[in-house]
Every structure is written in structure tokens, then in C-alpha cells.
Amino acid sequence: MTMNKTTSIDTPPVGSRVTISDIARIFEVSAMTVSKALNHKPGVSPDKADAIRSYAQSIGYRPSHAARSLLKGRTHTVGICIREGESAKPWGYPWLYGLMREIGLALKPHNMHAQTCLAPGGAAECRQAIEHFMEIGVESLVIGPLGAVEEYHQIADLLQHCPHVLAFDAVDDLPIDHVKWNTYLGGQLLAKHLSELGHKRLMVLGVSQRELDHPSLHVQLNGLRDAAKMLGLRIDSQDMYRLHQVEDIPRILKDVYTKTAPPTAVFCHNDWVAMHAIQSLTAMGLGVPDDVSVTGFDDLPVAQISTPGLTSVGYDLKSYARKIAEIVVDRVTSRFETSGDGVALPSMIRWELEPKLMIRQSTSMPKSKASRRLK
């Protein structure tokens, strides 16, 4: 559909609030195009710009406070768009809220502040969140985690006029700034640790469907499996369990550890899953680590104070947040301190945070090997 200033457009219901995104949908253009038209900026054909402004005036459209700030050139606002997906579940990303806080603190010295939007689901929900951020006039976006490269392409048209950083993600094949942590190496470190203790067979608790669907992803499960192959550690397909709810953990562990010769160690997708696993194993009368070793991932504060202390892999969230803030400030500064829409920004940035293995009391030699050594 092609809109022009003579086209008849329905007036919105009385009392309803019309946003830039609503106008963009009516004219089948991007929210950025509507913003340019309303602010008399270049990049929109004169006829379309006139039609958009006429319609906005006819319905009494008034920009939000943040949108009015755009007329002055700056809002000093960064949008953080988190695609929840499986992160809302117990095997997801329990560190996420702490990290968002750290990003906000890292931006503060630069006179910038963050607004966060959680987008449950896939690309469609991400689009809605990004349209909201365009409405309030964010100067940069931090997005992730994406399920696959295809999800980025479904929102790329909204991002082309706004600097953005991909974070919390293992998707590498994208021509954008990317800040991530090396979870693949984290999986390798835990595999090496368990192998050195003498474990020969592991089970994995909390596998995500994304990891199963994308075996080439640079993520913790694939790091664990690749290292296990080299080290002679056995991880059978039937020993990898997805979780739909934490209440499934006791049932899964009971099924595994009532069989003959079960795995001697449990690799958990994150620390929260590991806490539930330790609780369930203890309730079954099994000792951790005397009978079964348990590892977590993320090294949350709870890992340090649990009983027993949880062996885990962790990352420096403050360093990660500072790097994201550094890239955002660099991009925004380049955007506002140069003139013209076609000025090239600095080259693409790739940055990766290395993990650190934290060995605590939840892992030890398998019982049989420990007994042999005592003899």
C-alpha cells in the first residue's frame, strides 16, 4: 500500500494514544522514517513526509517527552532489549538482571542512562520492543540473546539507523559490534577439571533446545562435549536432559541414580539448576561430592555460600558491562559529533570475556578411585 496526502485514513478512537510505531504501521514505513518526517529531517520523500505530518496533525499527535528531546539532538538514553525465551526458565540466565544493573552503572559516568525491555518470545516481540525504543528516541541499543542469525535479519531494518551492540549471545556471523563471554571455553574447563579428578562418565542437566538444534554454536555444552571427546569422558545422548520446570529435577535424578553404574558427575547448565540438583541428591541419600560430583555455571554469589561450595565457571560482570558501555559511548559520540547521515562509524568491534574456573567442595574424585588411592 502506498500512502499519500490525499489517502483517506481512519481516525483513531477518542482517548487512545497514538505512537510513532502506530503511524509507521499505517504508512508501512519504519518508525525512524516517521521520526524523520515529523522532525523535517532529510531521507524521506516530500510527498510522504507531508502525508505523515498531515495525518499526525489531524489526529492531534503529540510526541513523548523523550521524542521532544530528539528535536534538541540528544536523549542520552540507551535501550537494552533482552529476548527472554529460555532465559526466563531455570536453565536460562540468572545473572541477567545483575548485568543490566552493571551496564546502567557503567553508563552513568558518561551522562547516559539505560532503559530495559524484556521481550518474551522471538523476533516479533523484539521488533515491538525496538519500536518502543525508537519511539522514545534511544541513541543506541544493546540487544540479545538471539536464537539464530535469522532473527537478526528479521529486525535489521529497525536497527539500520541506530548504533547497536549484540550481547549475551553466541551468534558470530553478523556484521555488527559483538560483546560476549566465552562459554565454550567454560564448558571445556569444567570437562578438564572433572577428567583430572578421574571421572569417566557425565550427565548434563538443563540442556537447551537451542544447543541441541545448533551443535556448531560456540556455547558451553559444545565446549563440554568437544573437550570430553578429547579427554575420553563419556556423555551419552540419554544422559543429556532438558528441563521444563525445576520440579522435574528430583524425578530425573531418581531415574538416573537408581540404575546400575550411573554417571559419577552432573554438569548443570547454571548454578540454580546445580543447587536444585544437590538438594535432590541429598534427599535421595547420596552425598555430594562423596557419591556424585556436581558443577554449576555462572558462579553466582549463591555458589560461594552453598553447602557444599559449588564448583562453577564465572565471569567478571563489571568488566563485561564496562566494555558494552565503552562501545555504546564510542558509537553515540561518533554519531553526534559528526555531521551527515553517511559518516562512517569506527570499524566493527569483537570482544570476548574469558571465564575463570572456581573449584570448590562439590567436586572430588569418584568414590571408587578415591578408595583405590586410600589403599
Image (cartoon, grey):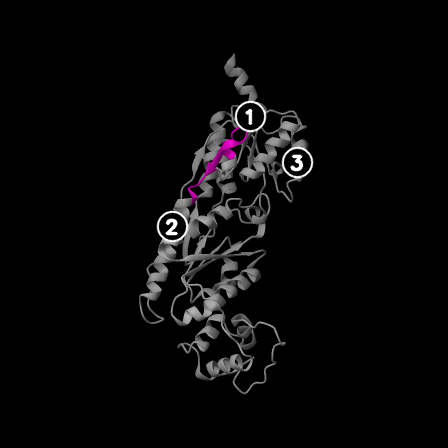
Q: Which residue is mark 3?
A: 252
- Local packing at callout 2 (Cα closer than 10 Å; few below 14, some 14-19, many 20+) is some
**Quarter-of-image position of residue 272:** top right
The quadrant in which residue 122 appears is bottom right
Mark 1 vs mark 3: which is more N-terminal? 3
Quick one: label 2 or label 1, which is nearer the N terminus? 1
Magenta stretch: give its range.
303-317
Q: Nearer the viewer, residue 101 or 224?
A: 101
Q: Marks 1 and 2: in contact by CB < 8 Å?
A: no
Under circle 2, the secondary element is helix
- Can you tell which of label 1 and label 3 is closer to the viewer? 1
Q: Quadrant of the N terminus?
A: bottom right
Q: CA distance from mark 3 to mark 2?
A: 40 Å
Mark 2 or mark 1, which is nearer to you? 2
Q: For the residue marked with disc 1, what is the amino acid?
A: Pro
Placement of 102 over or under 17, stated as above or below? above
Q: Amino acid at mark 2?
A: Lys
The residue beneath circle 2 is 323
Q: Is residue 265 left or right of residue 244?
A: left
Which residue extends farthest bottom? Answer: 6
Q: Secondary structure at mark 3?
A: helix
Which residue occupies 53% across, 81% down?
A: 55
The answer to whether residue 35 shows anywhere in this view is yes
Which numbered dot is residue 289?
A: 1
56 is higher (above) or lower (below) than 200: below
Q: Secondary structure at mark 1?
A: loop
